Image (cartoon, helix red, strand yellow):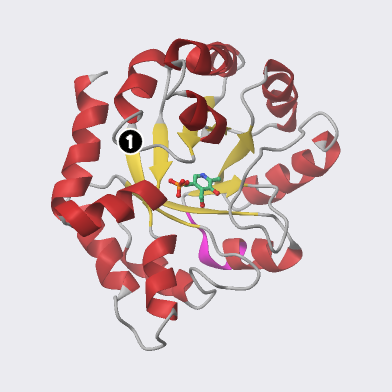
Amino acid sequence: MTRLSVNINKVALIRNSRGGNLPDLVKIAIDCEKFGAEGITVHPRPDQRHVRFDDIPKLKSVVTTEFNIEGNPTREFMKLVTDNLPDQCTLVPDAPGVLTSDSGWDTVAHYPYLKDITEELHAYNIRVSLFVNAEEKYIEAAAKTGTDRIEIYTGKFSHDFYTDPGQAVQAHIRCAALADHLGMGVNAGHDLNLDNLSYYTKHVKPLHEVSIGHALISDALYYGLQNTIQMYKRQLIEFQ
Ligand code: PXP
């Protein structure tokens, strides 16, 4: 069964736009779980424009499903992660000022670095996932780092889905099967939405987890958070 991890960064963005604590990020995390989310994802960026560093311990103390912290493993980020011990840490190669993560690791070039970081996180019993583009060479090199999982970047798939879904998903089918063969779990994320999620889930196997933020929080403006989470979960359940 594919788990739905809700990325609550966009909720923090709204809160930060006014100062104060509305909407309350901790309450949102608790409610997402109550409404069916099987994980909570946050992506603390260096400028703290979304989730802030001081949100992390508060979220850690309430999340009962799976707490996933994602980001670029700078020393500051690594301290945040090892101080707060999430269930999973997703390593993402995003530059400090980037609007959103738009590419995975070059695991071939950064193999020794990623191996060291993975070992460091494993020493704290934190599951590691590496964000990668859907290219087999990156999956093969990822396996050598000792990572537990990969997260396949689905931004390009989501864009190409509207013109040729069959073509768009091909590389993802191959990469998920290869990761499975090499002993890694498979997550996926970026720009997944109610148009493309069921198609992706139906074709890409195994698929252990999807992490979804922007579209889900936007849909919640129309359908409400509880309905929206249920709608996304239905996409996952019906196509297993
Ligand atoms: N996975 C990673 C590594 C990300 O950086 C993001 C965006 O923060 C997501 C998944 C979620 O993407 P989206 O907000 O488009 O659903």
Query: SS for tag 1?
Result: strand
The quarter of the picture where residue 153 lies is top right
Amino acid type for the residue under numbered disc 1 = Arg
Residue 141 lies left or right of residue 43; in this view the side is right
Residue 54 lies left or right of residue 62; in this view the side is right
**Residue 216 higher or lower than 26, as above or below:** above
Figure quadrant of the C terminus: top left
Residue 219 lies left or right of residue 171; in this view the side is left
Residue 183 in sight from this viewpoint: yes
Residue 22 lies left or right of residue 191; in this view the side is left
- Please name the residue that numbered disc 1 is placed on: 3
Q: Which residues are magenta?
A: 82-86
Front residue of this view, candidates 160 and 112: 160
Residue 46 percent location from the top left of the image: 65, 69
Front residue of this view, candidates 121 and 138: 138
Q: Residue at x 60, y 53 (%)?
A: 124
